[in-house]
Amino acid sequence: MSAPFFKFGAFGDEASLVVAFAIGIGFGFFLERAGFGSARKLTDQFYLKDLAVLKVMFTAIVTAMLGIFYLSWMGFMDLSLVYFGSTYLVPQIVGGLILGVGFVVGGYCPGTSVVALATGKLDALVFLAGVTVGIFGFGEAWPAIAGFVNSTDLGPLTLPQAFGLRYGLVVFLVVVAALGAFKGAEAVERRMARREGAV
Amino acid sequence: MNISLASWSLPSKLALVALGLGALALFGDPYGGGAVTIQPRELAAMVQKEVDHVSVQELSDWVLQGRTDYRLIDLRDATAYAAYHIPTAENLLITELPGDSLARNEKIVLYSEGGIHSAQAWFLLQAEGYKGATILRGGLDEWNDRILHRAPAASTPTAGTLPPTPGATVAAPPAVKPPPPAAAPAAAPKKKKKEGC
Amino acid sequence: MAILNETARLEPRSTATAAARREAAPYMNPYLAGVGLGLVLLAAFVVMGRGLGASGAFSSLVAWLVSAVAPAHAQANEFYADYLGSGVGHPLKDWLVFEVLGVLVGGFLSGLLAGRVQRGVEKGPRISTRGRLTLAFTGGALMGIGAKLARGCTSGQALSGGAVLSAGSWAFMLMVFAGGYATAWFLRRQWQ
């Protein structure tokens, strides 16, 4: 048996939708467990009170990255068949900035707002209406902005390729950077808690 | 100093595991895996059942229909390829085969002059895990005999989709040549839709 | 909507904040939740050969709505046409749409088990509900534009692309944090 199972024809398109639903349940479950159904918990990240967003996100990335790396190294998974999108550097930098602003203004990102809606948050419903309208605006503006959105196309580029480093070395550096960030996050949280206590 | 692992908090234990796996990753190569074990019996069964073959009639239908869900590979040298090749075919030498240009999940049709070269290439690809590799039965020789220089009387049941005169077919290839798979309008939206989130 | 109706009985709408939150179970340790999330992400890669997503599902929804109202207009627009596909299947019969439906169910299950399903509006004490909802809509619209510009949101780009070490995803991720920290001070009244 070789992974990715779908790419090797283990099941068809119809069954893949069932898989999508099942994986979605797991995704939503852990997002809610982490507290990401709450806009205040999420935005506390940006007021340095609770850095759960950073901790959860980087732990998830490190876990999946290590899993992909070792499964591929063992020959169980064919990394060349794993899909990921092309890098469009400038639109992604601009899009990231807009998304970051939208995060603080709206309190959620698309995935977490779905979880928040599931747990009854009305603001998440309004947020999702905003997302839909935003995408609609983007679609209507498409003829005018298509040139920019498709600019700086670097293809499916990985960090190891971009910096000319070995894949394993980048994996190691990401782990070290994440552990460093966690240590820093704990220190920042402690300091903020002390300051709150003093006030 | 008392360093008992049991007294460590859960995050610290997780961090230790991550650090260990990260350090070990320095010695690994994720693209180097994929050591496919050859299953002689499975291959023999495929040959026996002839599932590894595509007939020239089938292929000519696919070409005329403009199907883009397969890759047609011409294994001959560049001069022979330039002189004539089956419409939509790409030129790859056997030495270039298990490279980046083909994916393991693609349907691949191989052809050469006769059948031997493509049969060897087929085995090579199967051994590398390209399960979708197939051979054009009879190769270009049979394509020439049955499709290009076919007398009208010898029409096969599938000939209905082909122009009636052989001369027209010979002239036709550039006209029926669909765009390369990557640029096909039907395939492109599917790809783009998958873009993450 | 069924979810909202059901949970409305638990708590009146306006008080679903501090008092209710105290009764709810505490959140999971973030590192443990991260490992769980990472394993779900890994499962997506192993089973499907792709990562997770969220905003793509809403793109399919928008494209479908536009095509229902103005079919010719939708087909003429490359952006919508991409999400409408070749026209063989329904635009909503899409991997990400079904995944997001799963997120809805998974989030509800977890919230139910922890006693965190409460109808209400999340906000800081210094902003009106109306102000909060206006900002939620504005933020959502920005998020929709930003996610389409970057070809993915925090799930599709940051999480999934990050795990396969996509260069664009890491650049995107750093910019999300940069954009957030740059704006936080101006919106402190909404949250703190």
Image (cartoon, rainbow, N blue to C red):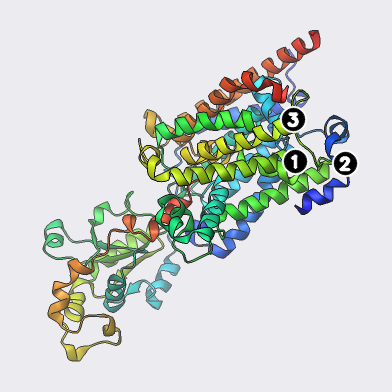
| Residue B102 badge | none
Q: CA distance from mark 1 to mark 3?
A: 10 Å
Mark 2–mark 1 distance (CA, rounded to whole Å): 12 Å
Report the chain holding disc 1: A
The spot of residue B115 in percent (x, y) is 24, 71
With respect to residue B119, does A133 lie above or below? above
Counting from the top left corner in percent of width and height, residue C20 is at 86, 35
Residues flagged by tags 1 and 3 on a common chain: no
Q: Which residue is mark 3?
A: C123
Out of B75 and A94, give the one closest to the viewer. Answer: A94
Q: Chain of mark 3?
A: C
Q: Residues within 10 Å of mark 3 (few under 14, many from 20)?
A: many
**Placement of A196 over or under C151, stated as above or below:** above
Q: In the image, what residue occupies the spot 25% across and 63% down?
A: B88
Do circles 3 and 2 both sit on a common chain? Answer: yes
Identify the mark at residue C11; answer none if there is no mark. 2
